[in-house]
Image (spheres, helix red, strand yellow):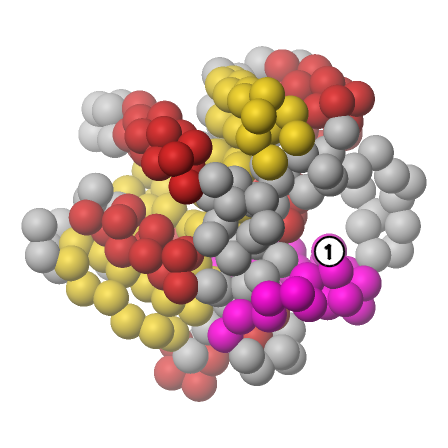
Amino acid sequence: MRVASRSLTREQDGISGFLAYPAAAARKPGILLLHHAHGVTADLKSTVVDLAHLGYAALVPNLYHMLGEPAQSHIGRGAELQQRLNDGEFLRVIGDSWRYLARRADVDPTRTGVLAHSMGGRLAIPFVADTPEVRALVLYYPSIRDEIETELRPRHAFDLARTLKCPSMMIYGGLDHIAGAETRRRLWESFQANGQAFEWHFYSYARHGFASPDSEGYQPELAAMVWPLATGFLHRALVEPPLA
């Protein structure tokens, strides 16, 4: 399959990020990839290309860039940036990115989902709660803590996950230093309560960031093992249903 890819800019495209898609003009399912705290790193661009080779139009928006941070990646600055940028700002530019992808002539918006890592996973839950058009959600170790609601983070995933209207997959590790055992339990219960199909994949030896080469928790063998599970779930949710 021949794949096309290019960087997107606010000036030319209205959003910043990286896009890849099968070159054929036929309508195809779409995937919005939400980045971790490091920003749009090289491995996420590779993931977008890999998804295009599987038949998806895939986009990873540069959320930081759209909120005034010009660099492509921000390794080591994620905590600082999240203390300055509130969830409402993040969700606004995620919405802009979703609309850009879903309105492409070669994308079927009824077969479009979200794949998210860490910080992106935390943000994906309120975004999907607010966007019933999302047809599938895959979360790699969302960076969720059992914390009080604040002006920066006014709505908690424990409440929002109960309202989701699409199939979901969650991938966590027992050595995750952000989401502890009690947080994972409560999140599992919240997803179970929404009545949608839900897959929970747990690896006792997995660390936070196991799929990210820029993370101290990187575990490449585990990342390679989990990838077919994630793409299989997306295929079942976005490709297998009959055409409308």
Is 183 on the left-hand or right-hand side of 130? right
Say which of 216 and 101 sits in front.
216
Residue 162: image location, x then y, percent: 68, 24
Taking the spot 56% from the left edge, 75% from the top edge, the residue there is: 65
Read off the residue under disc 1.
87
| Residue 123 visible, this angle | yes
Say whether residue 66 is magenta.
no
Q: Which residue lies furthest to the bottom in this view?
A: 11
Q: Is mark 1 on a helix, strand or loop?
A: helix
Q: Look at label 1 and name its amino acid.
A: Asp
Taking the spot 72% from the left edge, 38% from the top edge, the residue there is: 177
Taking the spot 77% from the left edge, 66% from the top edge, the residue there is: 80
Please tell me whether residue 69 is drawn above or below residue 111 in the rendered image.
Answer: below
Magenta stretch, main secondary structure, is helix
Q: Which image quadrant for residue 76?
A: bottom right
Residue 235: image location, x then y, percent: 29, 30
Residue 43: image location, x then y, percent: 40, 57
- Write the start and end of the magenta stretch as one range: 72-97
Please tell me whether residue 188 is drawn above or below residue 85 in the rendered image.
Answer: above
Q: Which image quadrant for residue 194?
A: top right
Please tell me whether residue 222 is drawn above or below residue 71 in the rendered image.
Answer: above
Taking the spot 60% from the left edge, 70% from the top edge, the residue there is: 74
Can you say which quadrant of the picture contains the C terminus?
top left
Residue 63: image location, x then y, percent: 57, 65
Say whether residue 89 is magenta.
yes
Circle 1 packing at 10 Å, graded few (<14), some (14-19), many (20+), is: some
Is 92 on the left-hand or right-hand side of 48? right
